[in-house]
Amino acid sequence: MKKLINYTPSRSNAILLGLLPFALLIVLYMISSDARLAINPSDKILPSFSSMGEAMYRMAFTPSRRTGDYVFWQDTLSSLMRLGSGVLIAASIGLFLGLMTGALPLLTASLSPLLTVISLVPPLALLPILFIAVGLGETSKITLIAIGITPFIARDIQRRVQEIPSEQLVKAQTLGASTSQILIRVLLPQILPKLIDAVRLSLGAGWLFLIAAEAISSTDGLGYRIFLVRRYLSMDVILPYVAWITLLAFLVDYLLGRLNRRLFPWSLEARS
């Protein structure tokens, strides 16, 4: 008899096993919702799927009377633009700092302690300071995301640079390469796929900072809408919004993974 530890499911079985927990959660929710609504039809804690569908249809396909916008899509666009801007800034700064501090011992000695200390500062604690310094507009939200994930990306890139075999640097110098040539032509191409991986790992924190900033000061966005309707106990809006944020996070992560495989196929081959 084959031991369980040696059993590897086929691709189709793996997909089914992956979907099973989600199906069980949906069934459990439906049972719980029906039970609560049977006792109290006006219960708002566990709304039915039909009520959630009606609420989301209204927000996605009925223009707002105040602004004329389709609220759901406007919230999605605003949040994605803020997240994208913050992550792009963080990736650029993190790549530069990580590459420099990982490759140049002088900068490693001088900047690594500072980078470590900055990474230990809770970014949400800086939010009031950002509001005072740069106002309540888009700049503060994007800055919070950038500050929150830049140290993580920079430290990860720094470690990746230091993991590159020193023999490559010695060979490049033997062939007459300067410091800038080594950084750009030897280290940078090997670090770019690691950068995408670091961004993927930091997206969870990026979403957290985005939702927090939107909840405190914003006029649109997914986080803003969730905290706006909570005062009315509108779980028929909150739950679909949370599910939508989860789906967006999954799609962004998936697309970044595909982009990494498309741009740097040699990186995956090297890992295998």
Image: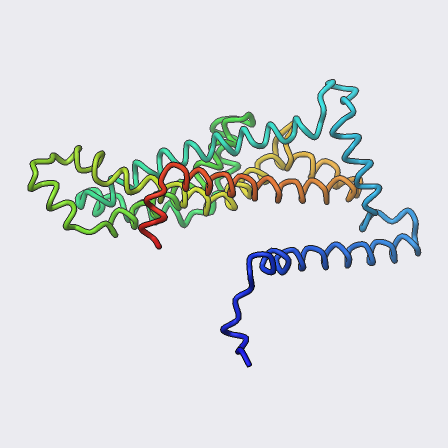
Coloring scheme of the render? rainbow
Question: What residue lies at 74% left-to-right and 18% top-to-bottom?
Answer: 68
**Relative to 146, residue 272 above or below:** below
**Relative to 4, residue 169 above or below:** above
Q: Is residue 172 left or right of residue 35?
A: left
Question: What residue lies at 28% left-to-right and 42% top-to-bottom?
Answer: 190
Q: Is residue 54 left or right of residue 118?
A: right
Quarter-wise, where is residue 147 in the image? top left
Quadrant in which the C terminus appears: bottom left
Query: How far across and down, in percent of the image, does residue 263 sit?
Result: 38, 36
Q: Is residue 179 left or right of residue 191?
A: left
Query: How far across and down, in percent of the image, does residue 251 sit?
Result: 56, 40
Quarter-wise, where is residue 100 in the image? top left
Quadrant in which the N terminus appears: bottom right
Q: Nearer the viewer, residue 50 or 136?
A: 50
Query: How far across and down, in percent of the image, does residue 111 sit?
Result: 26, 43
Question: What residue lies at 17% left-to-right and 37% top-to-bottom?
Answer: 182
- Give the number of marks: 0
Query: How far across and down, in percent of the image, does residue 160 sit?
Result: 30, 49
Q: Residue furthest bottom?
A: 1
Q: Nearer the viewer, residue 268 or 189?
A: 268
Q: Is residue 188 left or right of residue 234?
A: left
